[in-house]
Amino acid sequence: MADNSVLVPASSRSLLADSSVLESKIAETSKENLFTGSADADEEMPQVETRVVLVQDAGRNEALLKALETVKIMEVPVIKIRANCPEKSRESLIKSLVNMEIKHPCVTTESVEEYAEADAPEFENVFVISDFQHPTFRYLYKAECRVLGPPIVLFCAQKGEALPFTSRPLYCASMLNLVLCFTGFRKKEELVKLVTLVHHMGGIIRKDFSSKVTHLVACSTHGDKFRVAVSLGTPIMKADWILKAWEKRNELDFCATDEEFKSEFKVSPFQDCILSFLGFSDEERVSMEEMTIMQGGQFLPVGDENCTHLVVEENSVKDLPFEPPKNLYVVKQEWFWGSIQMDARAGETMYLFEKQDSPALKKSVSMLSLNTPSSNRKKRRLKDTLAQITRETDISPFPPRKRPSAEHSLSMGSLLDISNTPESGKSLSDTPKISTKPSKILTPVPQTQSARWQVAMELYQTESNYVDILTTIVQLFQVPLEKEGQVGGPILAPEEIKTIFASIPEILDVHTKIKDDLEKMMIDWAETKSIGEVILCYSKDFVKTYPPFVNFFEMSKETIIKCERLKPRFHAFLKINQSKPECGRQTLVELMIRPVQRLPSVALLLNDLKKHTSEDNPDKTMLEKAIESLKEVMTHINEDKRKTEGQRQIFDVVYEVDGCPANLLSSHRMLVQRVETIALGEDLCDRGEQVTLFLFNDCLEIARKRHKVIGTFKSPHGHTRPPASLKHISLMPLSQIKKVLDIRETEECHNAFALVVRPPTEQANQLFSFQLTTEEPPKVDWLKMLCRHMANTICKADAENLIYTTDPDSLEVNTKDVDSTLSRASRAIKKTSKKVTRAFSFSKTPKRALQRALMVHNTPDARSPGPGAEGFASSRMPSTTSLAHIPSPSMVNLFERKYHTFSRSTTHLI
């Protein structure tokens, strides 16, 4: 059946001006009703004149004129009328937007009257004006003309989109598609101003709050809208958010939902709240008062009539010291921490504190007294209950638990014994009810069990406790932190969560399987059962799961401490969860250390089990293999941890040294030693400069202290890193160091040494001399360490033969005036001279090339001197600037005589 409908342009603004009809592109159109200006639609639609009118300053905006050359289409509202429907039926009208080509070039004008009056159904004019406060804008607004601001035109050109249609003036896209609701505003003028600005920035306003609202703008923290927004996790903003966003209306890339910008204007959890604290220690109270100020609230002493909330430590306070007024909320401390965690004030009704003599408590006590009319009956019932528990304990194959007080008394030995856990103090009812399975246990266990059975049962119990602890870590901490749609946004970044928990879930999976295997074994116990085989079966899983956790445990602990200090929401999250019974009054850090302790604890129990296993028992051999396997696993973990720490140290060097080569990072490389020195020569840097030597197992990184330190580095995840304090000079393979010179101690030379180096690109040796500035490590130990790694690199066994002892005079090395005032002034003059030379030099001659040219010129028969002589001579070479200004051959001869004298004194040494 043919569609007899026709298309007409929206001739009346009143039809489309309702915000519920065409308030935003998303709300007002659908894929079915959005036409793209095809040929079929053009045949049914009358011709509409479309053009852009630039008003006043907008016509002189070059960027705007260029953007309009890109924008070729605009959205035009149309109405499709169905002929088959009754005229008054709402289904007879289909409101749609059609993308129509802008057929006329843009028009610039100072007066808009002629265009505004011509804004009839056959015209579709878009007026672009820069000032929405100008009288011309008010004239266009009253004439119901279509008005845009320059930023929205630039935005459409950048995105390649059509000029949008809105029923209200649109200046920019800062709040495009945001749905806002207001609460707590009493002044109509203020509310009208805010609503108008939101519309100018592309936002939508809703009178009633619903799940479609993206932001609630609140002037007060009271009211139903506020409570619903908190429960739905909708961001609650201050009015200044809108005002500050309007100030940035001309910034094209600005968005009002940018997290860094938006976080400044969120309503604080304790806004309009005055708190007081009862039952806390002085340290806790001061900390909570500081947190209150940080979260936008105030605090007063207990009993002050101006307080709005009294936060009570319910474990220590049994009764209030005064009768609270009706307008005072008396809440538990969980309300305080929960509000900080949600980043919004939590509802008080869920956290109200009830006194012991409260009506609710009295009612429960009276009901209890009805059920226990006499004390004799209570005694008999208690006696029967104890007898029943005793019988159950005798029948159960599991021995009774230790006292909680004994479990929580930590000692040095507790670090190696996983039985010191909060789960060890659980009541008997919390014990895994293996004995209650009727199909498994057919006969009661005898009263006397063997020593082997008791050790095996202890292994099972500690394994069960360990699994409970890992489950607590995952379910109580990790899962809530990873949960999407958290109220107030994510508490931690994904990278921080991964750093903290590492491979905990994988470890939990392995030990859950071990616990199940041990459980089956203990249910159907026999002395020939092989516990060693169970442990041996999972040794490969230990190697896979434990090293990632143990290696980065210190980093995990540091991340927890740092985030708790810097992120109040995470601090509140820990306060809430660590106070729950599952944690046994232990912190997350204390729980996280359990995997580090577990494998040594299992090894000790297996050794104990081996002692109580007879020689003819087949489990004896399996236990020995299991113990040996655990030792190998722990050795592998320790070795892997050492390598990981070495890799971390290399990364620290890369971050500390500016310009450090990327090839320093290598899987086989480790940092051996770091020493602080002072340069005694002028080859690597100026004499007297502070130089740091990083000795790796196969190379030597040389860096000097930076003269000017840049600002701190901030990663994309917000982690700040201190600025690089060193500047890279050279990365020297140890194979290039030919000899290590131990310079004798004299009055004018102390703690000095030198390296004879032959780079592959050079034909001569070079001499680099240094002075150690610290007593640790001693010079002798440092040089032996350096030579040992040199020998390993070049595959030599005689590391001691690489050290040579020499006098400082033979090398012309002196440490007496290296740090004097005159020396520092000389270095400052040289630096200034270098800067001036670089500033006025247009063609710089490479220093090394100039040195080689001069050495060839000074050598008889134009031949290069011996390798040792040239190396030492080049180490005493003047700077490029001084060589370039040698005035006469006499100076060259002087330098030549000095060179030959110095080379004779060093050739014998080499």
Image: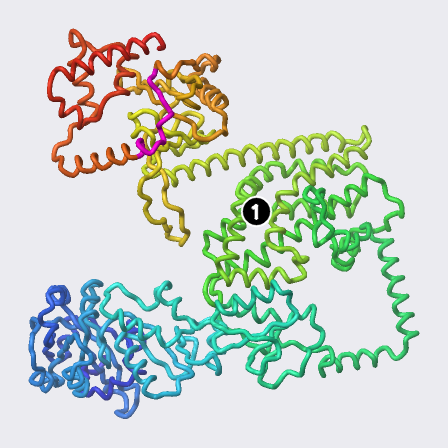
Q: Eyeballing the image, is 297 above or below 564?
A: below
Helix, strand or loop at label 1? It is helix
- At horizontal 58% and vertical 83% (from top left) the residue drawn is 305
Q: Is residue 907 magenta?
A: no
Report the side of 808 relative to 880 (left or right). right
Residue 325 image point, x, y percent: 62, 85
Quadrant in which residue 11 is drawn: bottom left
Residue 735 image point, x, y percent: 38, 19
Q: Which residue is mark 1?
A: 506
Report the side of 752 relative to 685 (left or right). right
Residue 583 image point, x, y percent: 65, 57
- At horizontal 86% and vertical 65% (from top left) the residue drawn is 385
Asked if residue 51 shows in the view, the reply is no
Q: Main secondary structure of the magenta part?
A: loop
Pick the quarter of the image with the C terminus: top left
Quadrant in which residue 580 is drawn: bottom right
Badge 1 amino acid: Glu
Query: Which residue occupies the foreground of this view, 290 or 826?
Result: 826
Q: Eyeballing the image, is 302 above or below 636?
A: below
The stretch in magenta equals 811-824
- At horizontal 41% and vertical 18% (from top left) the residue drawn is 743
Query: Which residue occupies the foreground of this view, 205 or 196?
Result: 196
Q: Eyeballing the image, is 612 above or below 431?
A: above
Asked if residue 57 shows in the view, the reply is yes
Quadrant in which residue 23 is drawn: bottom left
Residue 242 image point, x, y percent: 33, 75
